[in-house]
Image (cartoon, rainbow, N blue to C red):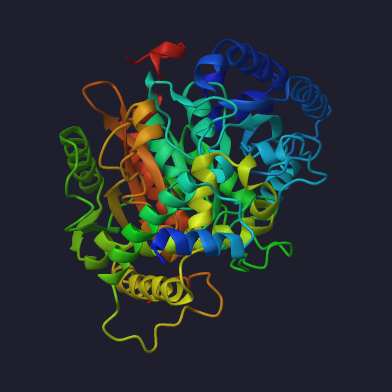
C-alpha cells in the first residue's frame, strides 16, 4: 500500500471526505514535517514530560 | 484627524468633553466606507450599533459617569471572537449564519470598561486558511503587499485609521506578524494571562488573545482590562494583574536585554538588519545593557510547532470537518486535516522538543529582563506570494507560543520602499510590565509610531 493509499484509507476510517488533491498536499506536508522531526529526536527521552498545567511560571525573584 | 490619535489622547479629549465618542465613530465610519473596499479590513461593520453605543457613552460621560480611559473608545475585534448579537464568521463558509448569544470574555471585559464595538475584522479562515470569502486584507503602506495574517484585518485597520484599536489572536505570530507588516504594535500576552473563552480555537496550548494598537501605552491599557482569571477558561492564571500602564515611564536604565547570537539575526533583509542594529544602539543609549545569549534550539522548532498546532487544531475541528469538510477552503481543510495523520509518537516527540526548548529558553530568561529580536526577517511581501508560497512568517515568533512567554512587536523603521519593520520584545512569564516599559521607552525615543500611510491620509510615503 502506497503512502497515498494509506492516507486515503485512514481518511475514510476517520470519516473525512478529502479529495486526491487534498491528500497529495497532506502527504507532502507530512513528509516534510516528519523528516524535520526525525532530525530533532531527543538524545535522552526520559524526563521530558510537559508540565501538568501549561501556564509558564513567573521568574524567581532574587 | 481623530482616527489616527492613540487611545490615551482620545481619552483625555473625551474626559474633558472636548470631543464626543460620536464624533470619533462618525469619522471612523466615513473612513471605513471609503477605504474598506480597498483594504478589506472588516467582515462586518456595526454602524448602527456603534453609533447608538457612542451616543450612550456620550450621555453617560455628560452625566458624570466616566468609566475610565477606554470609555467611549471604539474597538474592532477579530472575527474569530464571539460578539453577542453580531455575526462571527471566522471567515468560514461553515459559520456564515453564526450569531453568538454571548461575548468572548475579552470582548465582555473591554465592553464593561466602556469600549464600543465598531466591527469585526478580517482573518484567514479559522486563523490558518485563506481569505477566500470576504477578500484579502491588504497593506495600507502599499496595497499590492500583504497585511500579514491571521489578524491582518485588525492590523491594517489600525494602521490605516479605520480603527482606533483592535484585538487579534496569536498562535504562531498572528498578532505580531501583521502588526509588524503594517507598522503598529501587536501583543501576545503570557499564556494564561487572557481568557480564550469565546474565541474559535486553533491550538489550545498556544492560542493567545492580545491587543493591536497604535502605541505601546494603548496596548498596556487594553491588556490591563483584558487580563485575569476566568472560570470559563481553565487555562487562565490566578497571577495578579498589575496596571500595565503604571510603570511605563520608569525608563530602561540598567535593564539587561538578551540578544541571541545566532538564528534570529541571520538571513535578514539588509533594511531589517540595519533597522534592528539601530534599535539595539538606541536601547543601549537609553541605558539598557545588551547581553549576548545563546539559544541553539531556536532554528529547529518549526516541525514540532506544526505537529502540535495541527494536531490540536484537528482535535478541535474534527466533528465539523466530518460533517462539512468541503465547506472549508482548501488551505484550512488541508492544513487542519494534516493533524489527523501524525502518530501519537510523533505528537509526543514534538511535545518533548517543546519541553527542551522551554528549558533552554528559561535558562536564558533567568539571566535577562527581556530578549530582543527582529519580528520578521523581511518586510511585507506581495499578496500573490502570500497566497501561493509564503516564506515562513512565524520565523521568530512561534518560539514564544511554544514556551508561553509574552512577546510584542513595535515599529522600528521602514525599508527603502516605505514598508514598516518590527522589533520583537520578549519578557519573562507574566512580566508584560517590563515588556511594555521597554517598548514604550523605545517608542517615545524614536517616534516611528507617528508615521502614517499617505495613501490613507497620513504623513509618510
Camera-nearest residue between B342 and B425: B342
Above or below, B348 against B9 in this view is below
Above or below, B7 against B327 in this view is above
Q: Is residue B427 visible?
A: no
Residue for point 15% across, 35% down: B270
Q: Looking at the picture, how far across and down is residue A52, in whole percent? A: 55, 80
Rendered image quadrant of residue B120: top right
Quadrant into which the C terminus of chain B falls: top left
Q: Is residue A40 visible?
A: yes
Q: Looking at the picture, how far across and down is residue B36, in whole percent? A: 57, 17
Q: Is residue B109 found left or right of B407 in the rendered image? A: right
Q: Is residue B4 found left or right of B274 in the rendered image? A: right
Q: Looking at the picture, how far across and down is residue B402, in whole percent? A: 42, 63
Camera-nearest residue between B1 and A38: A38
Q: Is residue B332 found left or right of B104 in the rendered image? A: left
Rendered image quadrant of residue A41: bottom left
Residue for point 55% across, 27% down: B9
Q: Residue furthest bottom?
A: A46
Above or below, B29 against B429 in this view is above
Amino acid at each position: 500500500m502506497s503512502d497515498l493509499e494509506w492516507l486515503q484509507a485512514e481518511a475514510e476510517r476517520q470519516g473525512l471526505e478529502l479529495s486526491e488533491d487534498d491528500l497529495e498536499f497532506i502527504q507532502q506536508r507530512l513528509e516534510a514535517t516528519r523528516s524535520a522531526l526525525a532530525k530533532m529526536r531527543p538524545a535522552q527521552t526520559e524526563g521530558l514530560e510537559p508540565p501538568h498545567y501549561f501556564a509558564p511560571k513567573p521568574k524567581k525573584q532574587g | 484627524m481623530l482616527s489616527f490619535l492613540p487611545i490615551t489622547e482620545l481619552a483625555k479629549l473625551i474626559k474633558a468633553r472636548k470631543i464626543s465618542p460620536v464624533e470619533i465613530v462618525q469619522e471612523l465610519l466615513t473612513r471605513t466606507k471609503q477605504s474598506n473596499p480597498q483594504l478589506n479590513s472588516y467582515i462586518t461593520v456595526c454602524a448602527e450599533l456603534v453609533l447608538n453605543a457612542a451616543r450612550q457613552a456620550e450621555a453617560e460621560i455628560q452625566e458624570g459617569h466616566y468609566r475610565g480611559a477606554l470609555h467611549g473608545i471604539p474597538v474592532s475585534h477579530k472575527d474569530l471572537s464571539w460578539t453577542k448579537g453580531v455575526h462571527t464568521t471566522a471567515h468560514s463558509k461553515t459559520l456564515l449564519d453564526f450569531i453568538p448569544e454571548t461575548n468572548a470574555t475579552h470582548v465582555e471585559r473591554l465592553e464593561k470598561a466602556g469600549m464600543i464595538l465598531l466591527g469585526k475584522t478580517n482573518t484567514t479562515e479559522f486563523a490558518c486558511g485563506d481569505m477566500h470569502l470576504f477578500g484579502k486584507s491588504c497593506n495600507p503602506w502599499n496595497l499590492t503587499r500583504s497585511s500579514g495574517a491571521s489578524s491582518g484585518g485588525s492590523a491594517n485597520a489600525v494602521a490605516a485609521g479605520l480603527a482606533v484599536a483592535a484585538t487579534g489572536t496569536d498562535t504562531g505570530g498572528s498578532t505580531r506578524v501583521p502588526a509588524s507588516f503594517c507598522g503598529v504594535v501587536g501583543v501576545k500576552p503570557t499564556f494564561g494571562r487572557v481568557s480564550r473563552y469565546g474565541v474559535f480555537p486553533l491550538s489550545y496550548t498556544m492560542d493567545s488573545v492580545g491587543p493591536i494598537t497604535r502605541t505601546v501605552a494603548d496596548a498596556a491599557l487594553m491588556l490591563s482590562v483584558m487580563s485575569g482569571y476566568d472560570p470559563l477558561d481553565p487555562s487562565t492564571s490566578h497571577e495578579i494583574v498589575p496596571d500595565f500602564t503604571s510603570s511605563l515611564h520608569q525608563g530602561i536604565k540598567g535593564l539587561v536585554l538578551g540578544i541571541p547570537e545566532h538564528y534570529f539575526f541571520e538571513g535578514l533583509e539588509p533594511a531589517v538588519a540595519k533597522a534592528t542594529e539601530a534599535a539595539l544602539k538606541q536601547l543601549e543609549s537609553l541605558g539598557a545593557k545588551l547581553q549576548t545569549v545563546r539559544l541553539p534550539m531556536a532554528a529547529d522548532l518549526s516541525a514540532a510547532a506544526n505537529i502540535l498546532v495541527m494536531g490540536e487544531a484537528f482535535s478541535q475541528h474534527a466533528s465539523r470537518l466530518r460533517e462539512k469538510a468541503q465547506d472549508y477552503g482548501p488551505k484550512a481543510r488541508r492544513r487542519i486535516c494534516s493533524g489527523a495523520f501524525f502518530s501519537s509518537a510523533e505528537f509526543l516527540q514534538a511535545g518533548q522538543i517543546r519541553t527542551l526548548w522551554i528549558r533552554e529558553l528559561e535558562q536564558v530568561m533567568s539571566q535577562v529582563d527581556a530578549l530582543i529580536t527582529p519580528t520578521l526577517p523581511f518586510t511585507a511581501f506581495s499578496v500573490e506570494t502570500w497566497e501561493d508560497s509564503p516564506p515562513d512568517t512565524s520565523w521568530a515568533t512561534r518560539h514564544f507560543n511554544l514556551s508561553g512567554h509574552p512577546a510584542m512587536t513595535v515599529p522600528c523603521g521602514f525599508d527603502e520602499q516605505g514598508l514598516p519593520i518590527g522589533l520583537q520584545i520578549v519578557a519573562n512569564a507574566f512580566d508584560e510590565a517590563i515588556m511594555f516599559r521597554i517598548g514604550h521607552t523605545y517608542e517615545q525615543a524614536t517616534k516611528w509610531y507617528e508615521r502614517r500611510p499617505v495613501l490613507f491620509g497620513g504623513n509618510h510615503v
